Image (cartoon, helix red, strand yellow):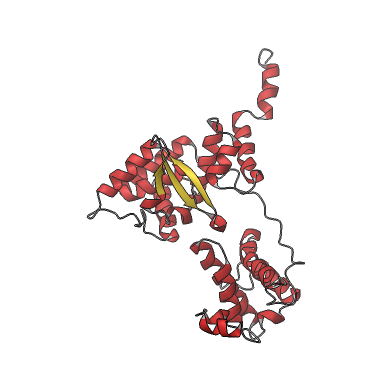
Amino acid sequence: MQTLLAQIHLPEQWKPTEKYTDEQIVNMFLTTCSRSPYTMRNYRNAIAKFRRFIGDKSLQDVTWREIEVYKIGLLEGLLSRANKPQAPATVAIHIAPLRSLYKWGSDPNIGMFKHNPTTCIRIPKIPVNSKNHYLTKAEVLRLFEQLKQQGLRDYVIGVTLVLLGIRVSELVSIQWNHFHTDPEGASMWLTIRGKGDKEREVKVPHMLWTLLQAYDATKPEPSGPEDKIFPLSVRIVEKIIKKAREQCGMEKKATPHWLRHTNATLALLRGASLQQVQESLGHTHINTTQRYLHTVQQIKKAAPDYVEDCFKDSL
C-alpha cells in the first residue's frame, strides 16, 4: 500500500501525515465539495473570516463556544468594519460553510475532527421578506426600456433574467454549448448548473433565443462553443440592474434576484403549476415555491374581495 501511494502523484494536501494543518484541511474539504465556483468562493471566504476570528486556535480545537460567540458577534455587528449588525440571513450564510466543513470533517471515515461543534448552534429565524419582491408587468417594461437605452447587452441581460428566472451566478456562467434542442428540434433548452452543482433544464422561449443570437451577431468575432454569453461578474450585473432601476425612477429597490421572484410570480399568475415553477427555478423543496403561490393568491383575490361580493347589491 505504501509503495502504491508513493507512486501516485497526489495533491500535497492528500498525502498521508500524522496531523494536517488548517490550510490542508480546508483545501481537502473544498476539493471534495460538489458546488458551483461561485459557492466555493463564498465558502472559502467565510471559512477564512472565521479563521481570522479564532486567531491562533486550530480548527481542530474549536468548540461550540467559539462558534456561538462568532455568531453573536455577527448579529451585533462586532465583526464588521462599520459595526453594523448583520441580518439573520447574512449570519446564516457565514455559518453554513462552517457547518458543512465540520460535518464533513467529523465523519468517521474522514476523521479530521473528533466532534462536530456546530451541531448545537442555532441560527436566528430568517423572516420571509421576499414575498413582495416582484415587479408588475408595467414595471418590468419600464425597466426593459431603460436597459435598452443602456445598450443591447444590458437589455438582453434583463430579458434573460426575467424570462428564465435564473440566478445571477447562473447567468454569468452560461456558455453557448449549454444550449441544445429537444429530440424533435422544436424548442431550445438550456442546461443550468445551479446550487449544489445540481443540473436542471430550462426551456428557452423563442423570442429570447432570437434575441440572444442577434446580440451575439453584434460581436466583432463569432463566439465559440465554450465562450460565455455574458463574461461579467455577479457584481457588474447587479450594478447594471441598479443603474436601470434608478434611471427610470423606480421606487422599488429591485435587484436581479427580484427578477427571479418576478418570473415565478408571473408564471403562477398565468397558470403554470407549482411543479413547473419548482423545476424551472431549481428549488429543492416545493415549500420554497409555495411562497410565491401565497403571493399569487393574494393578488388574484383577497378575503375582502369575497366580503365585498356579499354587499355589492346592498351598498
Quarter assignment of residue 31: bottom right
Instruction: Note whether residue 165 is visible.
Output: no
Considering depth in this image, is 253 or 11 the residue closer to the camera?
Answer: 11
Screen quadrant of the N terminus:
bottom right
Considering depth in this image, is 159 or 100 the residue closer to the camera?
Answer: 100
- In the rendered image, residue 209, in percent from the top left (x then y), is placed at 36, 41
| 193 horizontally vs 287: left or right | left
Above or below residue 132? Residue 29 is below
Above or below residue 46? Residue 150 is above
- Tally the numbered discs: 0
Quarter assignment of residue 269: top right
Screen quadrant of the C terminus:
top right
Question: Which residue occupies 51% across, 61% down?
Answer: 36
Quarter assignment of residue 203: top left
- In the rendered image, residue 171, in percent from the top left (x then y), is placed at 44, 52
- In the rendered image, residue 164, in percent from the top left (x then y), is placed at 46, 43
Above or below residue 305? Residue 313 is above
Instruction: Note whether residue 208 is visible.
Output: yes
* Residue furthest left in the image: 220
- In the rendered image, residue 38, in percent from the top left (x then y), is placed at 50, 62
* Residue furthest right in the image: 120
Question: Which residue occupies 63% across, 78% down?
Answer: 53
